[in-house]
Image (cartoon, helix red, strand yellow):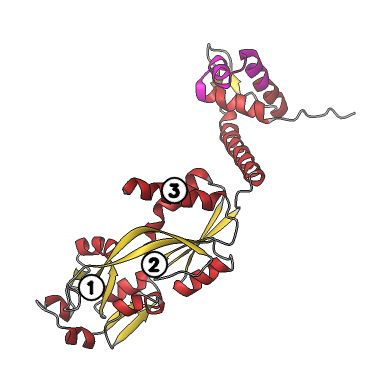
Amino acid sequence: MLKQTPMMNLEQILAFVTTVETGSFSAAARKLNKSQSSVSIGVSNLEDCWGVQLFDRSSRKPILTTDAQRLYSQAKLLLRQADKMNSFASAINNQVESKIVIGVDPMAPLSCLDSMLLTIDRLYANTEVEIRLLDHKALQQGLLNHSVDIGVHFGDDSYPQYLNFMTTHQYEWLCVCSPDHALANCAQISNEEILSSRQIISQSLKNHPVLSKTSIMSQDTWEADNLIQSSHMIELGLGWGILPADWCAERFSLGSLVAITPEFNQAQMYSALDVVWAANRNIGPVCQAIIEHITIRKSNSN
């Protein structure tokens, strides 16, 4: 009759890893809140299971053997995977979203998502996140048909009945061009010069019900998909454009963009960046945490 090989368990693995990390059975026992004998027996049973001597016990403190070095690395991975499985199970029991979709205006700097993403990573690291660049209309449609969970876009004069929103930031917009562009050296720029100079715009700017009326001035336009493409075309000297100041700051210091002040742009231009979500659905813990985080941050800034 074949002898049955004993099965290892996570408690034995934990005893092994903790003994290595603390340097002794007694220190591992204190950390795990167990008796020293139970830790020592757990490691011995693991040695029997694997048929490998894990520690040299000839000295006062156990020393990890050469053969056990690779097993130690794998044991740590196993414990991390076990923790992850426990987290997944807990998320299922607490009805945490397995995935959320965040729709973002293509002209919004992705840094606007930083605190949101850090909150998800800190509280719900096992939830998958998908970021979609969507213009104003597509984003609102996605929220209403529930294909998008949270939206981030530049504010509208009014929102559909079933959308809630909260302003998170006021973005300043700047007129900019390449240092090599003809407009860069003009002390004064008339509206006629702006109208006749090519402007680089984005589709989301063109389709926005508010920004399209205040930010598209030229009769000659080239169109890009998003902020990165628009900025790149402006930096190449292909035209002037209107970009968020937060995005421009680094490019000013690099010398790839300069600010210009046309006749029409004598006052600062601002636009609210809103976080938007559907009011006609039950949102899960992840989305709720995002909204609560933004609410608290906004309250602290007032």
Secondary structure found at label 2: loop
Say left or right for 299 vs 142: left
Dot 1: few (<14), some (14–19), or many (≥20) neighbours within 10 Å?
many
Q: Earlier in the sequence, mark 3 or mark 2?
A: 2
- Which comes before the other along the chain, label 1 or label 2? 2
The mark that comes first in sequence, 3 or 1, is: 1
Question: x, y percentage for residue 20?
Answer: 54, 24
Q: Amino acid at mark 1?
A: Cys
- Residue, disc 3: 293
At horizontal 38% and vertical 79% (from top left) the residue drawn is 206
Magenta range is 21-42
Q: Residue at x 59, y 29 (%)?
A: 68
Most frequent secondary structure within the magenta stretch: helix
Judging by the rendered image, the residue that carries numbered circle 1 is: 175
Evaluate if marks 3 and 1 touch, with contact meaning CB atoms under 8 Å apart. Answer: no
Can you name the residue that lies furthest to the top here? 60
What is the tally of numbered marks visible in this picture? Answer: 3
The residue carrying mark 2 is 155
Along the line of sight, the residue nearer the viewer: 267 or 229: 267
Tell me the mark number nearer the camera, choosing from 1 and 2.
Answer: 2
In this rendering, which labeled residue sits more in front, label 3 or label 1? 3
The quadrant of the image that shows the N terminus is top right
Foreground of the two, 115 or 51: 115
User: In the image, residue 29 lies at what x, y percent?
Assistant: 58, 17
Q: Residue 301: percent from the left, percent from the top?
A: 32, 48
User: Can residue 168 be seen at all in this image of the molecule?
Assistant: yes
Residues packed near mark 3 inside 10 Å, few (<14), some (14 to 19) or many (20 plus): some
Residue projecting furthest to the right? 1
- The answer to whether 205 is drawn above or below residue 113 in the figure is below
- The CA span between labels 3 and 1 is 32 Å
